[in-house]
């Protein structure tokens, strides 16, 4: 990293330069007691002092304002569920772990008479999100339309608004052992991606998802759509949309290794986000089935975002991940037929085609399973590498 000279922050230009430099240091992740670590500590103090002098704390924070109104009206946390959506969200808002969305602010302002100005005031560093989004990734987000037509000169405000549009916040992802991802994953980037997925989903109209629609039988029917080599991917997405499940294709952001996720923010319509990080047909179908498994099995857990990186090397997967893996595998290839099929031990094209025809699925799925089960990624490579998916989504910026 090119050495830069620290200097006092005297104006907004100095402030913006300090933010950029601080962000570069955060991304570099300097070791303790190094010059870079000392510079980051000094920058943090300079930035904090400038913000205190130029952004006076003349109104209470959102949490203070809510608690003051609760005391005035003798309200309990349960009384806020009607405004915030659930008991868990009330708890997270009051503890500072979840930010208020625009809908929450409007509901609290209208229902409890709390001024919107007070609800917009935050306790945390106003630049928390901006500092944790590296400049190259911000430019990538900009090119992909994350911010619409907003003015790019006010980067911190643009990023702040992106995170404010939905209830999901990075703090909810710090329990990394619960889901499948590397421990060093940037939670801010993953939530930024999820917000983009939710923005796309909000533009799609469909009927309400009926609870328990997704089960093993349903998933096997969806898997059989894969036999349509030319149109199966888009037909499956349309089939799920008809039943109230929105499937959104959104490439992963640089610095993340997401394959897919399921988002339960909208009670009426579960959202599946797919990155197509691995441009293979077998990967598409397994990821889709895995996220459908979460809808079938885990819609009642107190989480709004379950995310998956299938390359992660977590030694001990959570129960929900093991359950989703099992159901997805059963939906694609019935284990009873797999156990007696030659494809299980003989990686021949004929064996793979025979089992695929028997199950009514694309041969790439059988080939992918044979490679995984045998731990040999050279098996049936022609069947796996031949069929790709990204070219069906030409509007995405790969």
Image (cartoon, rainbow, N blue to C red):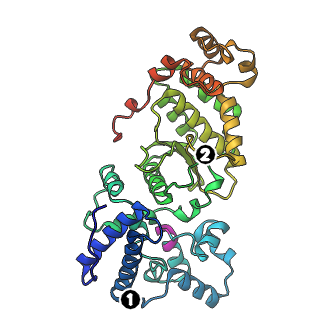
150 or 251: nearer the viewer: 251
Residue 271 visible to the viewer: no
Could you tell me which quadrant the C terminus lies in? top left
Outermost residue on the front side: it is: 34
The magenta-colored residue range is: 101-105
Q: Residues within 10 Å of mark 1 (few under 14, many from 20)?
A: few
84 or 8: nearer the viewer: 8
In primary-sequence order, the first of circles 2 and 1 is: 1
Q: Is residue 311 above or below residue 184?
A: above
Q: Tell me the element at label 1.
A: loop
Q: Which numbered disc covers residue 26?
A: none
Q: Position of residue 172 (x, y in %)?
A: 58, 62
Could you tell me which quadrant the N terminus lies in? bottom left
**Which residue shows up at 37% across the image and 59% down it?**
134
Q: Position of residue 122 (x, y in %)?
A: 47, 78
**Which residue shows up at 38% across the image and 64% down it?**
159
Q: Residues within 10 Å of mark 2 (few under 14, many from 20)?
A: some
Q: Which residue is mark 1?
A: 56
Q: Which numbered disc covers residue 209?
A: 2
Magenta-colored stretch includes residue 19: no
Q: Main secondary structure of the magenta part?
A: helix
247 or 175: nearer the viewer: 175
Q: Position of residue 47 (x, y in %)?
A: 36, 79
Report, in whole angstroms, how far the alpha carbon at label 2 lies from the one at label 1.
Answer: 46 Å
């Amino acid at each position: 990293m090119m050495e830069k000279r620290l200097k006092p922050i005297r104006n907004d230009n100095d402030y913006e330069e300090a933010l950029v430099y601080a962000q570069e240091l955060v991304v570099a992740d300097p070791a303790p007691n190094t010059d870079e670590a000392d510079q980051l500590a000094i920058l943090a103090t300079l930035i904090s002092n400038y913000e205190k002098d130029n952004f006076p704390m003349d109104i209470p924070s959102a949490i203070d304002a809510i608690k003051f109104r609760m005391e005035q009206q003798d309200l309990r946390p349960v009384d806020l569920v009607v405004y915030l959506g659930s008991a868990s969200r009330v708890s997270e808002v009051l503890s500072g772990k979840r930010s208020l969305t625009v809908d929450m602010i409007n509901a609290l302002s209208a229902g409890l008479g709390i001024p919107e100005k007070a609800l917009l005031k935050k306790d945390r560093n106003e630049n928390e999100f901006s500092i944790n989004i590296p400049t190259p990734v911000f430019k990538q987000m900009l090119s992909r339309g994350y911010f619409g037509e907003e003015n790019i000169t006010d980067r911190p405000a643009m990023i702040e608004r992106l995170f404010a549009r939905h209830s999901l916040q990075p703090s909810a992802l710090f329990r990394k052992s619960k889901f499948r991802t590397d421990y060093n994953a940037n939670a801010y980037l993953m939530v930024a991606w999820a917000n983009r997925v939710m923005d796309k989903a909000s533009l799609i109209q469909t009927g309400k998802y009926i609870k328990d629609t997704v089960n093993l039988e349903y998933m096997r029917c969806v898997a059989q759509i894969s036999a349509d080599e030319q149109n199966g991917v888009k037909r499956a997405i349309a089939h799920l949309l008809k039943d109230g499940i929105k499937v959104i294709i959104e490439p992963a952001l640089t610095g993340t290794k997401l394959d897919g996720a399921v988002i339960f923010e909208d009670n009426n319509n579960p959202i599946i986000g797919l990155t197509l990080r691995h441009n293979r047909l077998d990967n598409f179908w397994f990821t889709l089935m895995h996220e459908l498994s979460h809808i079938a099995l885990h819609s009642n857990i107190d989480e709004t975002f379950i995310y998956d990186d299938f390359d992660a090397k977590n030694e001990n997967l959570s129960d929900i991940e093991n359950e989703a893996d099992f159901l997805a595998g059963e939906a694609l290839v019935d284990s009873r037929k797999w156990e007696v099929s030659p494809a299980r031990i003989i990686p021949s094209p004929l064996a793979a085609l025979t089992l695929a025809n028997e199950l009514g699925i694309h041969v790439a799925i059988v080939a992918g399973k044979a490679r995984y089960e045998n731990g040999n990624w050279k098996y049936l490579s022609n069947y796996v590498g031949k069929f790709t998916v990204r070219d069906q989504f030409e509007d995405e910026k790969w």
